[in-house]
Image: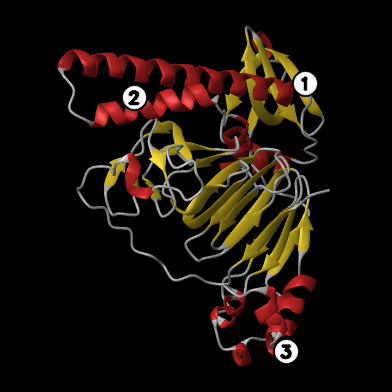
Amino acid sequence: MKKLLIVSSIALTAGVLVFSACKKPTENSQAADTGKANSPSAVVVFSVGEAKILHADLTEEKATLGASLKTGDKVSTKDKSKVDIQFADGSAIRISENSVIDFDGLSINSKGNTDTRLALVSGKVFAKVNKASKEDQFSVVTPTAIAGVRGTSFIVERSKSDKAVVKVLDGAVAVAPRVAALEGLSDEEIAKDEDLKKIQQSVASSEIVLEKNQASVLKADDKSLEAKDTSKISEKNIAGVVKKLDNSGISKKEEEEIRTIVTVDKETTDKMVRINEESSGKVDEQKAATLEAERKKLETEVAARQEEEAKKFKQILISAPKELKSSKDIVNYYERIEKIIMTDGSSMIGAIVDQQGSTMIVHTEQGIKKINQADVQEVIYDFQTKAKF
C-alpha cells in the first residue's frame, strides 16, 4: 500500500506577504522546463470572497476562475473566502479563509508524471489527492510536508502558535519530524556524516502512520530542529515531535468542505484559463460581456456540482450516520447540539441534520431519529452553550 509522507516542522519563521499593484504575468514569463510550458500547472476552478495570487515575478492578480499558478506563486485568502485549485494530475485543494499557501514546485515531466509541492504558511488547506502512478508526487510542506500518490483526503492546519494538525478522512498518511539540517542533502551526503546519519535514523524511527479518521498533532515549541548545527539537535526532541490521535476530530463542516471539492475535465480548465487571459487584456464592451457570461456559466456549473455533493453528503449523514456515542461526540462533530422538547413533556438531545417536509431528522446518541414536527413544542438551539457535555 502506498502511503503519504508527512514531515513536521517544529517552528517556522513567519513570512511577510506583500502584494504589488501590478498586472498578472504573461503565459511565457515562467515557462516550465518539461516540454509542457504552455500547460498551466494549476488552475483556480472556484473562488469565493477576496483572494489574491502573488506571482513569482511579484505581479499580482485576483484568484478568480481560470487564474493559472506556477512554481513560486503564492495564494492568500481573506475572511469568508476560499479558493479551489486543481492540479494537472486531477488532485485538488481548497484553501480556507485567512490562509497563505506557497506553490513551491509545480512540474510535469516528459512522461506526464506530476510533482506538486505546496507550503502552508498559515491557515488551513483541504486536499483530495487523486489516485495516480507511483511516479507522481504530491506534498504539503510547512509546518508539515505530505508526499504520496494514492487517493487520500486530508486536512492540514497551522495555528497561530505554529502548532500543526494533520487529519485524515480517507487513505493513509505517514508522519515524521522534519529537521532543517537534513534539508537539501542527498542520501550520499548524509551517509558521509555520522551525526546526520543518526538524525536521519531518528526521523525514520519516529515516523507514524495515520489511517482513516486518525490525526496527529505536531509540536511547535522546540526550536532545536531548526538548527543547521547537528550538535544542537537532540534525538530525544526528534522522538517527541509527533503525537498520534486515535480520533481525527474532523467536524461535519470540515468533512463537507472536502466532500464538496469538485474537479473538472481538461477542456473545461482550458476554457477557464482562456476566459481569464482574454479578460485581462484589452477587449471591447461586447467581448467583455461575452467573456463574463461564459465565466458566470462555468461558475454556476461548478457551484451546482458542489451543491449536489453537499446533498449527497447530507443523505449519507442520515442513511449511514457516524457512530457518535455521547452528546460530547455530537457537539464535537456538528459543533452544536439541540434540545427538543415534545408536546408530551419528554425531550430529546441531538443535532438536527435535516427537515424533510414535516419530519425533523435528528442525530442522537442512539442514532438517527425522525420526529413529526407537530409533536414538537420547542427547540432549544445551541444547547451546548447552556449545558456541560
For label 1, the residue is 319
Q: Which residue is mark 3?
A: 194
At 72% from the left and 65% from the top, the residue drawn is: 243
Taking 102 as reference, is 205 left or right? right
Alpha-carbon span between mark 3 and mark 1: 57 Å
Q: Amino acid at mark 2?
A: Ile
Q: Is residue 283 left or right of residue 315?
A: left
Q: Residue at x 37, y 36 (%)?
A: 67
**For the residues bearing labels 1 and 2, Cβ distance under 8 angstroms:** no
Question: Which amino acid type is shown beneath numbered disc 3?
Answer: Glu
Tell me the mark number nearer the camera, choosing from 3 and 1: 3
The image quarter in which residue 5 lies: bottom right
| Residue under label 2 | 275
Q: Are marks 2 and 3 in contact (CB under 8 Å)?
A: no
Up the image or down, 170 lies above or below 374; here it is below
Image location (x, y in percent) of residue 130 = 66, 38
Q: Is residue 179 above or below residue 258?
A: below
The way the protein has been coloured in the rendering is secondary structure
Residue nearest the viewer, comparing 389 with 156: 156
On the image, the x and y values in percent for residue 214 come to: 75, 51
Q: How far apart are labels 2 and 3 at the CA level?
A: 56 Å
User: Dot 1, crowdedness within 10 Å: few (<14), some or many (≥20)?
Assistant: few
Tell me the kind of residue under disc 1: Ser
Residue drawn at (32%, 14%), measured in percent from left and top? 293
Q: Name which residue lies at 61% across and 47% down.
A: 155
Query: Which is more N-terminal, label 3 or label 2?
Result: 3
